[in-house]
Amino acid sequence: MRKDRKFNEMRKISFEKNVNIHADGSCLVKFGNTHVLCLATIDEKIPHWMKNSGKGWVTAEYGMIPRSTNTRMDREAARGKQSGRTQEIQRLIGRSLRSIVDLESLGERQIKIDCDVLQADGGTRTASISGGFVALHLAIEKLKKNYNIQKPIIKNFIGAVSAGLIDNKPMLDLNYEEDSKAQVDANFVICETGEISEIQVTGEEHFFDEKQYYDIYNLAKLGVNQIIEIQKNSLLN
């Protein structure tokens, strides 16, 4: 059914770490032709509403460069505001990465993850979460070393992948062409332990039943396991 892979196969994935000399943690993540630059910044200032809480914060920003797609788009800064899609995606990235951080152990500091899509071919939000985790992990290891922090801050590895139904058949890790014609489109954010951070699933003018849902969910679990294995190899090497 697919030109280059089976229904249960991921695209080629890579995490290239330390690609930016200025960031506290950086990663260029590639899911096939989707490429996202993820940068982590440690900020000693926390949101004002968290002062004296003893806890830190993790947040994210997301954007697409003008020629990340087949036609040029204007920068959102030039338009004066972010789209609803951009706001929804960056909140998802922030929630997902925050879920695996012990905010008390982080202390009263904030880590900001910037995810900029250099090239888009479907799955930019899931690539951003998976690559953002690598950048976050590197930044936290740097923080622990600089401040001699012994207690763990990251509670779990986490990855994200898309899956869906095309012609009533389950598919893993959809590219843009597949995503645009999917009857059901889903994004899964899953920890190494199998615990779920978030699931987004929508029937694109179609209904789906429980069996079809579990078909794509089981594919997503396999995909996230592969992502986390590649994350670990990238961080160790």
Image (cartoon, rainbow, N blue to C red):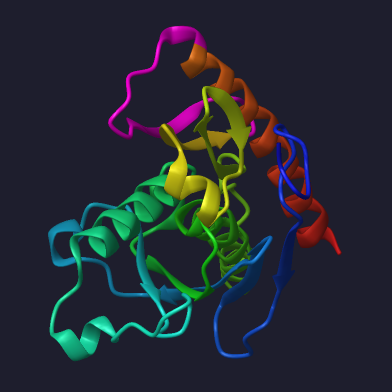
- Residue for point 36% across, 75% down: 44
With 12 as the anchor, is 159 left or right in this view? left
Is residue 32 toward the left or the right of residue 177 in the image?
right
| Residue 121 seen anywhere in this rendered image of the structure | yes
**Whether residue 75 is situated above or below residue 174 in the rendered picture:** below
| Residue nearest the viewer, comparing 78 with 165 | 165
Q: Residue 127 in the image: x percent, y percent?
A: 55, 57
Query: Considering depth in this image, is 166 or 58 the residue closer to the camera?
Result: 166
Q: Quadrant of residue 145?
A: bottom right
Q: Position of residue 159 (x, y in %)?
A: 58, 44
Q: Position of residue 203 (x, y in %)?
A: 33, 29
- Of 207 and 216, the residue lying toward us: 207
Write the residue at 64% across / 66% down. 33
Rendered image quadrant of residue 50 = bottom left
> Which part of the image, by quadrant, shows the N terminus?
top right
Instruction: Using the rendered image of the protein, determine whether residue 101 is visible from the camera's viewpoint.
Output: no
Q: Residue at x 48, y 28 (%)?
A: 196
Residue 210 covered by magenta stretch:
yes
Q: Is residue 195 magenta?
A: yes
Which quadrant: the C terminus? bottom right
Q: Residue at x 45, y 55 (%)?
A: 125
Number of labelled discs? 0
Q: Is residue 190 left or right of residue 49?
A: right
Q: Where residue 204 appears, x then y in whole percent?
A: 32, 35
Residue 225, quarter of the rendered image: top right
Q: Which residues make up the magenta segment?
A: 192-211
